[in-house]
Structures are given as C-alpha cells and as structure tokens.
Amino acid sequence: MKRLSWLHAWLMLLPALAMLMAFTHIPALTTIWHSLFYPARGSEPEEFAGLDNYRMMLDDDVFWQALNNNLWYALVTVPASMVLALAMALWVNGKIRGRSALRLAYFTPTMLPMIAVANIWLFFYSPEIGLFNKVLGWFGVAGINWLGDTDWALPSLMLMTIWKEAGFFMIFYLAALQALDRDIYDAAALEGASRWYRFRRLTLPLLMPTTLFVLVNAVLNAFKLVDHLFILTKGGPNNASNLLLYYIYENAFSFFDANYAATLTVVLLAMLILLALLQFGVLERRIHYR
Amino acid sequence: MLDKGKLHKGKRLLAIAVTSLAATAAQAQTELTMYYPVSVGGPLTQVVDGMIEQFEQQNPDIDVNAIYAGNYNDARMKALAALKSGEPAQLSVMFSIDVHELKDLDAIVSFDDVVETDEERQWLDSFYPALMENGKVDGTTWGIPFQRSTIVMYYNKDMFREAGLDPEHPPQNWDELAEMGQKLVKKDADGNVERWGAMIPSTGYPYWMFGALAKQNGADLMNSAGNETYFNKPEMVEALQYWKDLGSKYNVMPEGTIEWGTLRQNFLEGKTAMMWHSTGNLTAVKNAADFDFGVAFLPAHKNFGSPTGGGNFYLFKDATPDERRAALKLVRFMTSPEQAALWSKDTGYMGVSPAAYETDILKQYVAEFPPAAVARDQLEYATAELSTHQSGRVRKLLDDAIQSVLNGQAEPQEALDSAQNQAKRILSRY
C-alpha cells in the first residue's frame, strides 16, 4: 500500500520532471560538456580542450568588464526598481481618484515588448534629436551623448531597465498589499502608532515573502534581460555597456564560438545558482510566513 | 458589408491556387528557401518580395520561400541555425565578409562548382571586380554580389549655401572636410551646438568607416586570404587620429560615438550638414529629405577610397543537384542587369554589373538623379571590406579600439597596437 502511493507520487511528478530534465538540466549538463572542447573547424571533430576555455576566459578583458558591468547593473537596477515598485504600489493602493488609470499607466512599460521600447528609447537618447537632451536644453544644460559616451552608456541602460521593471514588480506588491489584514492596522491605529511606524513594523515585514520573490526575479532579470542592448548599444562603446549574457550571445552567434559561449554560460549559471542559494538560504530564515 | 472587389480578388486567388496546385501535380516542383537581411531604411522587403514573385511567374517549376531575417548578423544566424537543425535552406544573402567563416564552417559551395556551361562561367565575370573582392578567395567565387554598397558622403546643399560654401563643391580631401565642417557648425546663443558639420557613425559598423579612412590614407586593413591584419600600420594610426580630431580638435563632429541607427534621421532633421553612410540609404534619404542634398565621394587624403559593403548570395552545401541548379537560376535572375537596375533604383544599392547601368531603367534614372551613380563611380577607388577568418572576433577588436579612441580612453597607437596583437594571435591558426 505504502509503496503504491510512493509510486503514485513519482508518476504524478513525472511530466514536470521530464520537462525540467529535457529543457533545463540536460542542456545545463551538455553546456558544461561543450565548454571542455575547442571549437570545431569545418567537418573535423571537436578536440578536447580540458580547462583551456576557462583559462582563456580568465585572460579575457572583455569578460571581466562584462562581469563588472553586470554586477553594477544588478546593484543599481535591482534595489532601484524594487523601491520604486513598492512606492508606486503604496501610492496606487490608496484611495485616490483615477487609480485604475494610474495602475495601468505604471504597468504599461511591462506590457510593451522590450525590443519595441528600445527602438523608441534609442531616439529618446539620441543626442541631437532626442527627448532627453531637449528637456535638458530647456534648463540650459548642455546635452549628453547618452549612448555614445563610455561613462553614460551603462547608466542609460540602467535607467531604461528600471523604468521597464518597476511596473512589473509593482503588480506583485499591489497584490500583496491588498491581501493584508486590515484588523492589524486598526489595532495599531488604536495604539496610536504613527504612519511611518506602521509601515516599518507592519507593512514591510508582512510584505517580506513578496519582497523575496521580487528580489529573486529582479536579480535574475539583471542577468538575463539584455534585449535592449541589441538595439541601444550593442554592448558599446568599447564594451562600456556589455553584459554577460550579451557577450555570450556575441560569442555564440557573431564569433561562431559555441564552446567559449558555453564556458561563459557555465560561469553565469554558477553565479546565478549561488545567488539564488544565498537569497533563499539567508533571507528565507528571516521571513515571517503566515 | 461585402466588398465585391475583394470577393473577386478572393476568387482570383483561389483560381491561381487551384492552377498552381494542378501545376504542382503536373511537374516536379523545386522548393528553395533563402534568407536575406535588410540593414538600411526603407521598405526593402517589399522590393525583394516583388522580385521573387516575378521569378516564380517566369519559373513555375520553382517555388521560392524568401525569408527576411533581420540585420546581417541575424540573417547569418538564422540561416546557419536552420541548416543545423535540418531545415532546408539552399541559398541566402549574407554579409559579403562572412566568406572565410562560412568556408571554415564548411557550409557553402563555390559558384565555380555549380556553373556548368561556358556561358555560366562568363556570367561569373560579369560583375564589377571591386564587388568580387570580398566574394573571391584564391580565385574561386563563393559570393555573388547582390545588395552591395560603398560609403558615400551625403551633404545638405542648403546649408552649404547658408554657410557661404559652394554647394557643388563638397569637400574633396581631409583638410577641406575639417575646414568646411567648421564653417557649417552652428551654435546657439549659449554656445551649444545646434548643427554639426559632419557625422561619421561609429556604432554598428565602425570598422567599415575606418576602412574608408584607411583606404583614403593608402592602406588596406587585411590581406585577401583573410589571415593577416594591418591594424597598427602608421597609415592606420594617422587615419584614426584624424577621425578623433574631427571631434576633439576641429570640433566639427560630436565627441564620443555616433549612432548608426539614428544618423539618417539626424541628417534629415538638419542636425548635421554632412554624413557618411551606406549608399543603400540613398532612396530613403531622397524620399524623405525636404531640402536640397547632394551625394559625393568620400574625401581623399592620399587618394579617394571606400570599402565596398553589403550582402552577397551564397549557395549552401546541403542541397540536391536540382536545388543547386534552381538556386543558381534564382541568383542569376536576381542579379541580372534588369533586376539589378530595378533594385538599385528602389534602394540606392549599386547595380552590381556594368550591364545594369546600360539598361534603360538606370540610364534614365542616373540622368534624372545623378547621385545614383556616385557609388558606382567611386568603385574605382574601392577596396574590400574587412573580412578575415574568425571575422566577428577580429572585427570586434577593431571596433572596440576605434570606440575607445573616439571616447578618449586610449590613444590611437596603443589601441591599434593592442587590437593588432590580439588579432594576430587569433589568426595565427590560419
């Protein structure tokens, strides 16, 4: 009897497990395997490279720059878009006029395809005909070569990413806020707790499960959302805005070097696994689930 | 409401479908799949579709599936991915400079292996030699020119007049470009630049623009075998210094990099008096410009010069003999003088053979609109576009070096030395 239910459980899990194996785990393993070979030349078989691809990576300045850029990119876009998302959610959760319209407005960037948006932002950022420099011009500030200046290219990408992401995360916060129990707030109000105190000691802790969820997603996105690079900067100028995944793409499809791309992918994968472990391991213990 | 016209059209389509179905049953149909890129403005996909339709009408036994596949990079990627996954693709238009890599990947066959008759062999020699430079390796033809360009200088004649310059005398050399550019720069009361003298795009294809400057300075970027580059020759360093000086010394161009994708718009909105751009943009500029503009050779230093650019037809290895013959037929049709003439007129790309310019269509068009012949005339001074083994990687080294100099991160000599050393290491295997 017991064995039957055990079998039953595995059978129920099988479809999902099969999909996960086929599309996640097996490709991940073959990626590691590919990273151990030199690129094939013509129809000759691939030659075993051992760890040579990894050595090449350690010597590769562009890899280090992309990694560095990516860390900064994550460090800025993740907190910024999360704080903005929470602020917007609190704002549209209140009883204000036209809040449906406001919610929709905040959510619009999420609904638009990244490539389409990037094509529009390309013109926003254009130094001569773009919106941003025109606005700066009204205040008598000299224009910036947003995407063409090594100092500004990455921040420009960050700005667009935050704009794009915040609305998406807002939806999660909004849903969580609406599920909060009003009674606790009424009790707190009776005790004479200030608004700030209520936010800090009630809302924030109660939102922690959502925050963890959003955080995990935001960190993942910071490493896997590179669509806009194709349109805006192609990683330039001189790699100033190159990100890891884009560099992987370049290697795989512009340089035909699937093996080096696999090597970089292994590193990215390892980093993401590490980050996920860290987030779940450390934060989960501090989170209060009801 | 029922639209009668539409209904008729529907019936007609149905009739065509039925006849073509019958035709399919009657004769063996050869199906061809080709991918092609578009990298400039304008509704080019419609032009290609129109050409394909005409070909199918003339050759009812061949069915062509022409797939627009984004820019050059995307097209190559999609075609190769299709081949890898066993999807059929018998031919494609891809970057002319991909030839070494496509050969290394063993993906293509040479046209010499497919042509059979003397007449066909002669056809291989019917194109402009400069356009064959990127398509031939060791005397064997791997790519047939289709959407080919050179870089030309577009300039705003109205602004030339306004600045007191002769609109029929665009800058002929580097010094004039700097001088005239300075006269064309316009600033507002606060000293902010409202209009630049010139713009040379430095994203997307910086190595291409640099190839022009290098050639003007009398040097080529690489050898034709594609296994040696000459990035740090003194001529190169001087050329890159001049490019940077246009921004930082002569102030005729913005500093930092200039976006390829928005440059045409900049020119059309009068934000720059001159731009260097692909001739493939000519028709789009002509249709959109509300001012008097001219097209000129790029200025000379030691001599005139521009690399050719654009896409060639390639034949994939993985095809049956019948498909190869059909593919050859299609390539011959698409590059025939009449089609090349139409294509050139509709886009601004070059007519790929001298015979194309002998057609009534182009003769008349060039007479009406002389800029259409500038790219062709410039061919005399043209050189091959940067193309090597591991082209993508080598190209990126040069692109990064150029962008680092334009952004003031490195001096031309050190940036080009470093690019050259790395390129040498990559190419040492070939």
Image: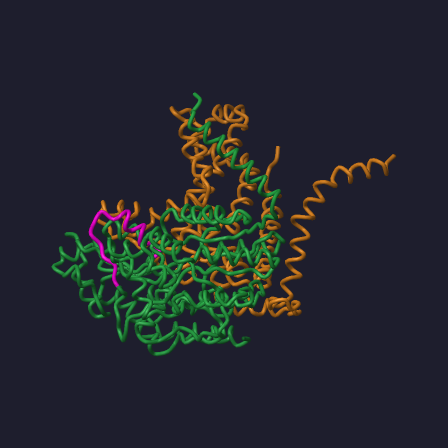
Is A131 drawn above or below residue B273 in the view shown? above
Instruction: Judge by depth and name the residue closer to the eye, A202 or A5.
Output: A5
| Image coordinates for residue B120, horizontal then vertical, percent | 49, 64
Note the chain letter of the green one: B
Q: Residue at x 55, y 34 (%)?
A: A206
Note the chain letter of the orange one: A
Magenta-drawn stretch contains B281: yes
Toward which corner of the image does residue B380 lie, by quadrant? bottom left
Q: Which residues are magenta?
A: B280-296
| Image coordinates for residue B420, horizontal then vertical, percent | 43, 74
| Image coordinates for residue A218, horizontal then vertical, percent | 51, 45
Toward which corner of the image does residue B168 lie, by quadrant? bottom left
Toward which corner of the image does residue B257 lie, by quadrant? bottom left
Image quadrant occupied by the C terminus of chain B: bottom right
Query: In the image as oriented, which residue stretches furthest toward the bottom?
Result: B234
Residue B161 placement, left or right of B430: left
Query: In the image as oriented, which residue stretches furthest toward the top?
Result: B1
| Image coordinates for residue A210, horizontal then vertical, percent | 55, 37
Image quadrant occupied by the N terminus of chain B: top left
Is residue A7 at all visible to an observer of this figure? yes
Is B7 drawn above or below residue B282 in the view shown? above
Instruction: Judge by depth and name the residue closer to the eye, B174 or A159.
Output: B174
Query: In the image as oriented, which residue stretches furthest toward the right?
Result: A1
Residue B82 placement, left or right of B347: right
Q: Residue at x 49, y 72 (%)?
A: B137
Residue B290 placement, left or right of B407: left
Is A95 drawn above or below residue A229 in the view shown? above
Magenta-drawn stretch contains B362: no
Q: Residue at x 32, y 59 (%)?
A: B277
Is residue A150 at all visible to an observer of this figure? no
